Amino acid sequence: MQLMRRRSIEATIAASDEPQRQLKRTLGAWDLVVLGISVVIGAGIFSKAAAVSATQTGPSVVISFLIAGVVCALAALCYAEFASHMPVAGSAYTFSYASMGELVAWIIGWDLILEMFFAASVVAKAWGLYLDNFLHVFGLGGVDEKGVASGIHNTVHLGGVTFDWGTALLIVVLALLLAVGTKLSTRVTGVLTAVKVAIVLLIIVVGFAFFSASNLSPFVPGPESFGESTTHATTMTQTLFSWLAGAELSVGGVMGILAGAGTVFFAFIGFDVVATAAEETREPRKNVPRGILGGLAICTLLYIAVSIALSGMATPQQLRDATPDNGASATIITAFQLQENAPTWATQVITVGILVGLTTVVMVLMLGLTRIVFAMSRDGLLPRGMSKTSEKRGTPVIIQVGSAVLLVIVTCFFSVDVLGNMVNIGTLSAFVLVSFGVPLLRRRRKASGQPEGEGFRVPWAPALPIISGLLCLWLMFQLDVETWLRFLVWLALGFAIYFGFSYRNSQLGKHPEQIAADYREGVPTAAGADGGPRD
């Protein structure tokens, strides 16, 4: 079996010109920066910062954000090189197809579907919770801090089933916007992102007005500071690193900071979505790297500022005392509600901002999800019929409708709260292979005498890409054992689909002339004597 057959870069780019399976190039560098900011700034910073501070790190959550930001920045450099040389839909999936082969590409594509789908589900579910908070803050109903529902609220009961009608409406509206056209959806996203960034700046300014330096001490609290109920860990809830190292606790001290970095990584989820829009970008060799790196840089600076303001507003103990689950549900709003003289309007404005922010996150994640599935479908690894695009709009309408229906079913009828770390591990696994793929692709193109081509190149290669891959692996080890077990089950399901359907229907298997030249030369059985595939 030709499990590692690779498609050449030239064939990959040529496939993007296939009639009825083309995406229109309408986006510029600024559009991509907006996409990056819109998807990154969302549920992570509005909820994870406070929750991690209360349960794992204390004020040193700032260091956790910095570590996660550095790891993402290194991975972003690798994404930028691939995207500038292969400006097609598919992101890490497409990059891995050219550098590591079809089986690895399938694994990455399957992991990206995990990332995009469940991230969209988790954030959409959070949007529904904040909708209830919004209705409560403005006296329209919702759910109060004790969990009592009144008036209008997001959840309705249909017989014995609960349904989140507001969340469903959000997904449907966003799917329609994306189906109409990527340029229109990015304009809407641009307006909403401007509002979201203004709210984040407001959080920073108002937060520093209630800043107390005494709340930063101790900056790195020990495990004993978090209490027995927080520090108790079972095998399933321990990080894989602490379990392998024989350490019992994953909170407080250095272990807490490392575990916190793995958790707050969720706040950076999505910058790689920019790479999925490469096929819809004008002058992608220049604009895609600018979009990826520019958006990530802005988000990292805002995150650090928000985490510093949060740490100065409330101590971890105050955040734990203010929530019924010992800090696990603490948010930015919790910190503001703890301030005696905090203006009511600030909480109201921030609540609106969070709703707006989460809306853009769900939209861009849905965009990324459809582009990953589109690329895999066009390559035959998923049913080819799904990859047909609208002649008028140039968008994959079938995939957008199908993914929206599945998102409504999963998000509005089921609890998805436990899937946050699944999103992290799926994303990090993609980062690992993209990072290691940069030196592999360079070496193979050089060995086959192919030109390097123009576009962005990662500096200090191969050292920097290898360091990036190792750091991403290290962050994966900071996730809990239960997440790893779920991830292995997801991979097993992916292998079953690949060997049951994808391998036999791959376009690369049917058209061996698209196989990378160095692979054909190294594996003479890749094609028969007549140029057709061997049985």
Image (cartoon, rainbow, N blue to C red):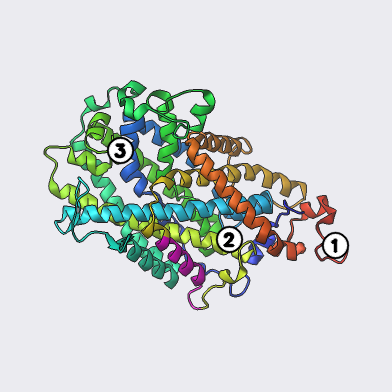
Q: What SS does tag 3 mark?
A: helix
Residue farthest to the bottom, as pictured:
392
The N terminus is located in which quarter?
bottom right
Quadrant of the rendered structure where residue 255 is?
Answer: top left
Magenta span main SS: helix
**Which three-letter amino acid code belongs to the residue tagged 3?**
Ala
Residue 352 in the image: state x and y as whole percent.
24, 55
Name the residue carrying label 2: 88
Quadrant of the rendered structure where residue 209 is?
Answer: top left
- Work out how far the residue at label 1 is from the one at label 3, CA to CA, in angstroms: 60 Å
* Rendered image: mark on residue 528: 1
Count the marks. 3
Q: Which residues are magenta?
A: 392-409
- Work out how far the residue at label 2 is from the one at label 1, CA to CA, in angstroms: 29 Å
**Which label sits in the foreground, 2 or 1?**
1
Residue 201 in the image: state x and y as whole percent.
27, 46
- Whether the residues at callouts 2 and 3 have beta carbons within 8 Å, the answer is no
Relative height, residue 421 to residue 113 (above, below): above
**Which three-letter amino acid code belongs to the residue tagged 2?**
Val
**Which three-letter amino acid code belongs to the residue tagged 1?**
Gly
Q: What SS does tag 1 mark?
A: loop
The residue closer to the viewer here, 370 or 461, is: 370
| Magenta-drawn stretch contains 434 | no
* Rendered image: mark on residue 50: 3
Residue 180 in the image: state x and y as whole percent.
42, 72
Q: What SS does tag 2 mark?
A: loop
- Local packing at callout 1 (Cα closer than 10 Å; few below 14, some 14-19, many 20+) is few
**Which label sits in the foreground, 2 or 3?**
3
Asked if one can make out residue 305 in the rendered structure from this viewpoint, the answer is no
